[in-house]
Image: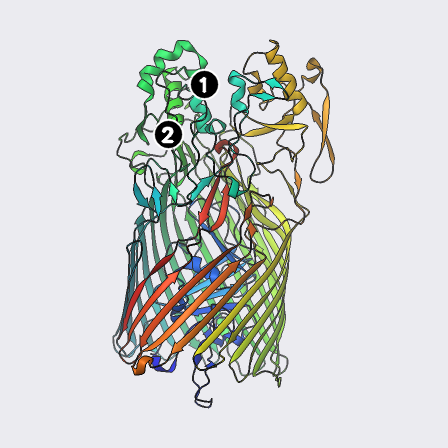
């Protein structure tokens, strides 16, 4: 285990700028042979290559942060790493996940079976399901961030890089304890503590915990409550043992718990697509107007402060069919405050994790070490959110006409008296309500073995194997999967059943397990109703891999490295079709698998390179390295489709990356400065991206090229100063890729028009000539009002000659001329995406920091340190189409802190401020599908947070 380090000898135990530059700067200490007034850079030890090394000796672009650096840099959790590592971006995801990207590479696929682009590890254990976004750091020894493809050093391979969180381990032979208490704005109260109890010289127990309570910084203007608060706590117990000199280990248990009103998305933005009343001078009236609005239209986010046109959504459109509404339910302007939402119910967010880890090490002789790493990880998570986060301004009709049939008006009154709908999940209301639930549980077991050598000769090796067995999403768990619930869907289901199944071709039972009106959606949802949409992807993974690296010292200064990896991922996913509106005659049991998807991905990858440590007169130490790596991430299984549908492939392909990297790490000026440079070029094949198709996320593959430069500099110009700078430059370009932009299905061609499918509420494209002809025939009495609603369903396809029409042509994204009938619907005109940027890949990130320490402040035993951190991220895009709507503005962040520390008695006081200028930053934007109206969910950084922390160590 570890022995206690004298805290007086380390003035700043922060991460090494020797590896990361700006925010993760090198620790510095006073060296006995240096001038008294000169602070020099101390060695920072990492285990990136599974053995203890100075970070400057590791031929990999890696950043490292110890606990002191985490505190000083105000790195509360995983999301804050974006401000401390070059070429990193982060955003929350639309569901319950997040997307941490390194050099533009993360996980843009949405599927239970998709693997992480950046591997998240804790104590080297790969965590497929993790709470990087939710959980806060506590009792951490170090956080390491590796940039670039990984596979020959870690158990699970990744294409973007690795984040490895290393917790503190028990210390033998000495009692230790520390505690910290924080109070801040938004009534923030945080507590952290640790106690290390020795049990002789060979056994010790370390227990650490953390708790956070904070009021919300988002206002729900409907309920009048502050939401998006935090109520979370963590506990970790680690037992360390060393029964003999050649055998040691530790056993750890960690629990994380959150139960609060966190929101999954910040706000919904939209540029309203109005309902049309004419086209090409031809009036559009009655039922024909119902397919003219797509909900939202293309516009920059800064010009998207409207509410979605509910008539262009599935829920709103079906409310019109049921007689509840006559048109758009959202008619007032949108509140432009990004931190205000409108929700009939406050959000619900619950998450739990139990992680068990056992690490055993056996020294075999003097030169070999065998390591066993065993883990069991269990997670459970659920979130309930308002689907739109905007309140309707038009109530349901007090007297409605279902299906446009006046004879059904009495039935309307019987079912919905005065326009009040009794929804068994969402309660009783005369206003349009839509909510969604995202959640599920996972269980994963991993077993890893490693054999490492430490020979005196020129050759050494590091070999490993890993076995992973995991499963996720139990259909019998009513909180698992993804739901969309709306009282308009329930109302139409009730109407269908009252008509004997006339609408859907049979009875469609509602979920009435607990039809109360207490606002608790979860206790009223069994999971098998036909009155809501539910996507289920029960998933199982069985994976094994063999990996390793060999090292050969060509000379005392030159080392050759060869790494290889073989990966075999076996993935299974049950086919569970959505039961929304599906009669029991067609699908007797909802939530029951009707088939099985299987995929087996096998690949051999590796890396090869040289690192050179020359003795140069201009530097104190220099490392130059050049490597080629073959990165790989397995393919996966797409989510289920509606019963009987075949809208997209059932699987998506793996990712491959040819990565070339050239770097150098240098310390100079008597070890008072460091400069690290890294240049890289990636040739990417099959990058996985997602697009919603008919309320389901489908994943596809695109090719890209990326290149970039990272500059990391640290300087201690005088005894009291520490200055750092960190620059990341990135260029990403899609290659040979085309795609249909659902916000611009016509690709700007005025000869075509996008309209709504009146059955599925997806959108289609038809020729403008054909659409005008059908509208003219309706106005002339040759067709009935409402017949244009059949265009997307192909009601007139092949009938062009009868209307005096023929074929029309268009040019697709590949430059090929396509021919199609003037009345034949199609998905749209593809765009040429060649040269477009990858999502979440800003061209520049910049970190600047300055720190000054007043030693023995006012002749006391206290040192006072003043620190400022500035961060800049250039603009980027949220989708591969790179439209105005996709652009995310550049942003800045400024943190300040003042720390008083007394090394003699272990007390410390810190005053801090994060995002001191209170910037409202949109870090990501998720475009929903056609049936949701193409609105955008945006994700925000935290507002200005400030407070005081008091620390004590024993």
**Where is 540 relative to 608, above or below?**
above
Give the labeled residue for mark 1: 505
Quadrant in which residue 829 is drawn: top right
Question: Going 61% across and 73% down the picture, which residue do you hit?
Answer: 625
* Model colouring: rainbow
Earlier-in-chain disc, 2 versus 1: 1
Q: Is residue 21 visible?
A: no
Question: Going 56% across and 32% down the picture, which residue do you hit?
Answer: 646
Find out whether the residues at labels 2 and 1 contact each other: C-beta distance under 8 Å: no
- Image quarter where the N terminus lies is bottom left
Quadrant in which residue 417 is drawn: top left
Nearer to us in this view, 19 or 849 = 849
Nearer to us in this view, 587 or 824 = 824
Tell me residue 411's x, y (percent): 35, 13
Tell me residue 158's x, y (percent): 53, 58
Quadrant in which residue 391 is drawn: top left
Give the side of residue 454 with respect to residue 348, left or right: right
Q: Is residue 780 visible?
A: yes
Give the labeled residue for mark 2: 529
**Where is 311 relative to 744, above or below?**
above
Tell me residue 312's x, y (percent): 50, 28
- Image quarter where the C terminus lies is bottom left
């Amino acid at each position: 285990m570890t022995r206690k380090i004298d805290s007086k000898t380390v003035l700043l135990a922060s991460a090494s700028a020797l590896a990361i530059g700006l925010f993760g700067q090198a620790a510095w200490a006073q060296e006995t042979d240096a001038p008294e007034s000169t602070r020099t850079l101390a060695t920072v030890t990492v285990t990136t290559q599974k053995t203890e090394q100075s970070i400057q000796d590791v031929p990999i672009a890696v950043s490292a942060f110890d606990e002191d650096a985490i505190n000083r840099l105000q790195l509360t959790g995983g999301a804050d790493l974006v401000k401390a590592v070059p070429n990193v971006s982060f955003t929350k995801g639309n569901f319950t996940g997040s997307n941490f990207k390194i050099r533009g590479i993360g996980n843009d696929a949405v599927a239970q079976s998709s693997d992480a682009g950046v591997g998240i590890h804790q104590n080297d254990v790969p965590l497929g399901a993790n709470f990087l976004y939710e959980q806060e750091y506590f009792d951490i020894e170090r956080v390491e961030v590796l940039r670039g493809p990984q596979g020959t050093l870690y158990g699970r391979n990744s294409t973007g890089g690795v984040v490895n969180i290393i917790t503190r381990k028990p210390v033998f032979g000495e009692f230790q304890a520390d505690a910290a208490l924080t109070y801040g704005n938004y009534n923030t109260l945080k507590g952290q503590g640790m106690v290390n109890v020795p049990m002789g010289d060979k056994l010790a127990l370390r227990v650490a915990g953390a708790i956070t309570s904070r009021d919300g910084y988002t206002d729900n203007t409907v309920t009048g409550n502050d939401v998006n608060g935090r109520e979370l706590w963590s506990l970790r117990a680690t037992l360390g043992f060393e029964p003999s000199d050649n055998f040691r280990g530790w056993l750890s248990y960690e629990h994380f718990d959150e139960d609060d009103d966190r929101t999954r998305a910040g706000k919904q933005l939209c540029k309203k697509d109005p309902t049309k009343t004419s086209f090409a001078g031809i009036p559009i009236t009655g039922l024909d107007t119902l397919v003219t609005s797509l909900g939202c239209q293309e516009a920059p986010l800064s010009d998207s402060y409207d509410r979605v046109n509910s008539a262009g959504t599935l829920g709103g459109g079906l409310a019109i069919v049921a007689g509840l509404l006559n048109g758009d339910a959202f008619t007032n302007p949108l509140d432009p405050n990004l931190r205000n939402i409108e929700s009939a119910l406050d959000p619900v967010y619950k998450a739990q994790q139990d992680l068990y880890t056992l690490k055993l090490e056996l020294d075999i002789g003097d030169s070999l070490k065998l390591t066993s790493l065993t883990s069991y990880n269990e997670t459970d998570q659920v979130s309930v959110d308002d689907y739109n986060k905007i309140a309707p301004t038009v109530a349901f009709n007090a007297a409605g006409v279902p299906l446009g049939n006046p004879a059904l008006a009495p039935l309307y009154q019987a079912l919905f008296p005065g326009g009040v709908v009794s929804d068994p999940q969402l309660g009783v209301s005369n206003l349009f309500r839509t909510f969604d639930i995202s959640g599920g549980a996972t269980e994963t077991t991993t077993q890893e073995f490693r054999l490492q050598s430490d020979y005196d000769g020129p050759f050494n090796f590091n070999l490993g194997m890993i076995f992973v067995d995991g499963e996720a999403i139990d259909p019998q768990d009513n909180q698992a999967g993804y739901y969309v619930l709306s009282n308009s869907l329930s109302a139409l289901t009730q109407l269908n059943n009252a008509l004997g199944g006339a609408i859907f071709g049979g009875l469609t039972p509602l979920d009435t397990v607990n039809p109360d009106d207490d606002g608790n959606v979860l206790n009223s949802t069994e999971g098998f109703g036909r009155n809501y949409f539910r996507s289920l992807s029960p998933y199982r993974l069985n994976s094994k891999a063999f990996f390793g690296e060999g090292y050969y010292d060509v000379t005392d200064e030159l080392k050759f490295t060869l790494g290889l990896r073989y990966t075999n991922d076996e993935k299974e996913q049950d086919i569970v079709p959505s039961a929304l509106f599906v009669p029991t005659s067609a699908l007797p049991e909802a939530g029951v698998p009707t088939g099985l998807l299987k995929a087996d991905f096998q690949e051999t990858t590796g890396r090869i390179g040289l690192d050179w440590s020359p003795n140069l007169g201009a530097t104190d130490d220099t490392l130059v390295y050049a490597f080629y790596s073959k990165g790989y991430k397995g393919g996966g299984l797409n989510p289920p489709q509606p019963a009987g549908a075949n809208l997209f492939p059932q699987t998506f392909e793996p990712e491959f990356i040819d990565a070339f990297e050239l770097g150098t790490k240098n310390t100079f000026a008597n070890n008072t400065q460091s400069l690290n440079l890294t240049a890289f070029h990636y040739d990417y094949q099959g990058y996985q991206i997602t697009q919603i198709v008919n309320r389901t996320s489908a994943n596809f593959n695109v090719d890209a090229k990326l290149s970039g430069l990272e500059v990391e500099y640290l300087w201690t110009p005088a005894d009291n100063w520490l200055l750092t700078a960190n620059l990341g430059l990135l260029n990403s370009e899609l290659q040979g890729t085309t795609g249909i932009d659902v916000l611009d299905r016509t690709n700007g061609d005025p000869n075509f028009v996008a309209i709504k499918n009146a059955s599925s509420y997806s959108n289609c494209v038809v020729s403008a000539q054909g659409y005008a002809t059908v509208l003219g025939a309706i106005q002339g009495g040759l067709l009935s009002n409402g017949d244009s609603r059949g265009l997307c369903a192909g009601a007139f396809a092949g009938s062009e000659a009868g209307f005096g029409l023929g074929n029309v042509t268009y040019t697709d994204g590949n430059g090929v001329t396509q021919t199609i009938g003037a009345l034949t619907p199609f998905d749209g005109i593809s765009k040429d995406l060649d040269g477009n940027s990858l999502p979440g890949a800003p061209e520049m990130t910049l970190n600047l920091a300055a720190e000054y320490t007043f030693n023995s402040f006012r002749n006391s035993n206290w040192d006072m340190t003043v620190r400022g951190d500035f961060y800049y991220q250039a603009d980027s895009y949220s989708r591969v189409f790179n439209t105005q709507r996709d652009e995310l503005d550049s942003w800045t962040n400024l943190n300040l802190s003042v720390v008083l520390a007394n090394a003699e008695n272990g007390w410390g006081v810190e005053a801090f401020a994060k995002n001191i200028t209170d910037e409202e930053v949109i870090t990501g934007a998720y475009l929903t599908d056609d049936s949701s109206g193409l609105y955008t969910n945006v994700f925000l950084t935290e507002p200005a947070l400030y407070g005081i922390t008091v620390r004590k160590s024993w």
